[in-house]
Image: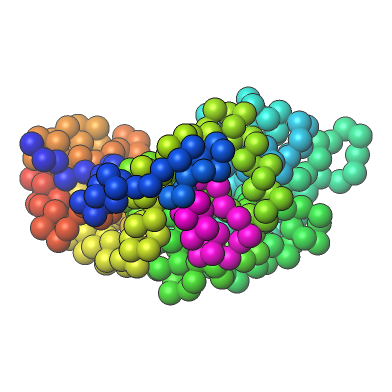
Amino acid sequence: MEYIDLRSDTVTKPTPEMREAMAEAEVGDDVYGDDPTVNRLEGLAAEMLGKEAALFVPSGTMGNLIALLVHCQRGHEVIVGNRSHIYLNEAGGMSALGGIQPCPVENQPDGTLAIDDILASIRTEDVHHPITRLICLENTQNICGGVPLTVEYTRQVGDLARQNGLSLHIDGARIFNAAAAQSVLVKELVEPADSVMFCLSKGLAAPVGSILVGPSEFVSRARHIRKMLGGGMRQVGVIAAAGIISLEKMTRRLNEDHARARRLADGLRQIRGLVVDPQSPYTNMVYLSLSEEVSTSAHQITQKMKEYGVLVDPENARRFRLVIHYWIDDSAVEKTVSAFQKALH
Ligand code: TLP
């Protein structure tokens, strides 16, 4: 059975064009810097993000970890959102592998960290304190609804970082969704950041891979740490070839996903028992909860949905996140709405 899979945009399979490019990719040993396809992908990524250099990494988690390990030493502290992926969903890598301490700051409902909260979290010079070194933002902010942060807000945080001798890293797993939703260039959105990680394997539909960008010196050190972590890959042009199509083509179609997410949210709003978050969707994620009158749990509904051919992921006992991506067309949106209708009534 071919499922409609809304669990995440990480589930995207490569397009036929990607598979063809992968089969024909020119390759070499990338640890020697000899893979022409990887070099093309990294060059293109650096140019699109407006940074000096780029590094192809196996996953978003590894990209963020490498960035943190380059920016920080043991005993340093990183200001992160308390609902951020780096803080909640990266297995504590910064602490376990880097001796780095997270300083969680409340994520506001719009995904931002309040400027005053960031300022209040910066440690003063004191022998007792860890040393604040870095601020991390997440754009789009996943758990806050897939909400995009603005150019203006990112500039404010960048200014604050510079004024306080800190660096700014953006977990931009879905930065191209953020740019598309706001009709701005991704370059503009990340201009204030010292480093940015973004994913090819989510809304951009590549099977594997993320990219870390920043100044050349930063990326050289990142390359060294990637090797240390076992992330130096060899003839990886076979994967990078798909990433090139992600950047050249998939980045241009993300508003189609956003429009379908709106259509899905509108459909689900008509179903008694479901409460779609009032502002949802901002980009490609629809967040919704079960209303009080519903006695069935989100886990039971997930089971029923599967029987109707739709895969969804419950966030907790009462809540779902549905993610639209390349492989979800208009008819999949309609089928999802009727599957929810059947599952609830
Ligand atoms: N997010 C996944 C899960 O891990 C939750 C998802 O389904 O959304 N930053 C952000 C903002 C992310 O959402 C993710 C993945 C990552 C980093 C990590 O990327 P990968 O999965 O490539 O390590």
In the image, 310 versus 30, the foreground residue is 30
Q: Does the magenta stretch include residue 50?
A: yes
> In the image, 122: left or right of 117?
right
The residue furthest bottom is 183
In the image, 305 versus 270, the foreground residue is 305
> In the image, 178: left or right of 106?
left
Q: Can residue 254 be seen in this view?
A: no
Vertical placement of residue 226 versus 327, above or below: above
Vertical placement of residue 110 versus 198, above or below: below
Q: How far from the left and from the top, in percent, is residue 344?
A: 13, 43
Specify the quadrant that holds the C terminus: top left
In the image, 187 versus 15, the foreground residue is 15
Residue span colored magenta: 39-61
Q: Is residue 202 magenta?
A: no
> In the image, 201: left or right of 265?
right
**Measuring 17% from the left and 58% from the top, which residue is drawn there?**
329
Q: How far from the left and from the top, in percent, is residue 285?
A: 34, 54
Q: How far from the left and from the top, in percent, is residue 37?
A: 43, 50
**Measuring 73% from the left and 40% from the top, which residue is drawn there?**
72
Q: Is residue 155 visible?
A: yes
**Measuring 58% from the left and 29% from the top, which residue is drawn there?**
229
**Measuring 77% from the left and 44% from the top, which residue is drawn there?**
132
Q: How far from the left and from the top, in percent, is residue 52?
A: 63, 60
